[in-house]
Image (cartoon, rainbow, N blue to C red):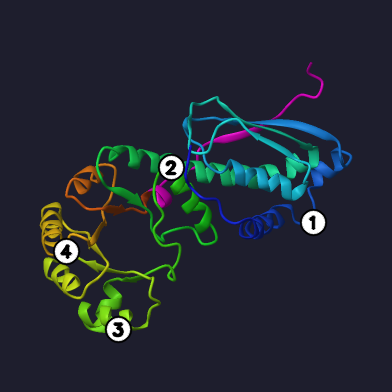
Amino acid sequence: MTAAILPSKILLDSILKGWLLEDIGRGDRATQALFDRGVLGKARWIAKEAGTIAGLPIAARVFELLDPTSCFTSLVAEGNFCEAGTEIAHLEAPIETLLMGERVALNLAMRLSGIATMTRKYVDRIADLPVKLVDTRKTTPGLRVLEKYAFGTGGGINHRMGLDDAAMLKDNHIQAAGDIQTAIARVREKIPYPLTIEVETSTLEEVRAAIAAEADIIMLDNMPIERMREAVQLIRAQNPRLKIEASGNVTLETLRAIAETGVDYISSSAPITRSTWLDLSMKMFDPTAQ
């Protein structure tokens, strides 16, 4: 099971309608020529390889947008692992609905399941440690809300959805502002009260500056493990309430060593940017079979 939250219906529908229009255009020529409108059909979805399933409620909505009477029955819960050959869903709808929605629905579920599968591998690697895996804004344009949903379905935690969620001062912000203290002071003056300020650091000197300027979260970016461990000890000694995030060069091979430094969060773009689609397929039931 998963605690990931689906996008609002109004947002999801606006996204899906655009993709359906892109694929269907003026109509499905083959399906329209072969079948009368309204003829019912049944189909099943099959996982052709093992992985963590994500996106079935979104796939169901694709078919509902084409025909509100469509029935999409998930056989595997979101976030659950399944073996190759597992039937993950059954569908019943007019044949034209099944065939027009097939590609968009499968593409989304395959993409999201691939992200969830890789995220789960990362999360499992550090499951026994008091640290959380978070995502980044390195997402496919137009797909962010769904890719982040898949990351959550795989057991990760979402970082900022966009620039308006929190003030993150990265190296370019600090370079342009002059220094960390100046950057934090200016931002603190102008942002709404509830927003937090996170500061990217790469040296112990920058960490000290971020502590002194009262950042809410300190990111340790691309630090060698020993320096990261020193930075964590420094922050804990001076302000135990500060949250610490590690970022940069996060792979399955480096993940555990980073987690063992004592940081609170590890951010990685890899589950979204480096994952491959999970192979899923749809097969129509033979209407003549008993």
Disc on res. 90: none
- The quarter of the rendered structure image containing the C terminus is top right
Q: Position of residue 9 (x, y in %)?
A: 64, 55
| Magenta highlight: main SS | loop
Q: Position of residue 236 (x, y in %)?
A: 14, 58
Left/right of residue 75 with respect to residue 20 in the rendered view: left
- Crowding near pointer 3: few (<14 within 10 Å), some, many (20+)? few
- Crowding near pointer 4: few (<14 within 10 Å), some, many (20+)? few
Q: Nearer the viewer, residue 214 or 287?
A: 214
Q: Is residue 8 magenta?
A: no
> For mark 4, what is the residue?
239
Q: How far apart are labels 1 and 2 at the CA level?
A: 37 Å
- Crowding near pointer 2: few (<14 within 10 Å), some, many (20+)? many
Q: Secondary structure at mark 4?
A: loop
> For mark 1, what is the residue?
26
* Vertical relation: 130 (above or below) 214: above
* Vertical relation: 184 (above or below) 255: below
Residue shown at 51% from the left, 62% from the top? 141
Left/right of residue 204 with respect to residue 197 in the rendered view: left
Left/right of residue 222 with respect to residue 98 in the rendered view: left
Whichever of callouts 1 and 3 sits on the residue coming sooner in the sequence is: 1
Q: Position of residue 213 (x, y in %)?
A: 20, 76
Disc on res. 154: 2
Q: Secondary structure at mark 1?
A: loop
> For mark 3, what is the residue?
186
Mark 2 or mark 4, which is nearer to you?
Answer: 4
Whichever of callouts 1 and 4 sits on the residue coming sooner in the sequence is: 1
Contact between labelled residues 4 and 2, with CB atoms less than 8 Å apart: no
Mark 1 or mark 4, which is nearer to you?
Answer: 4
Q: Position of residue 58 (x, y in %)?
A: 61, 47
Mark 4 or mark 3, which is nearer to you?
Answer: 4
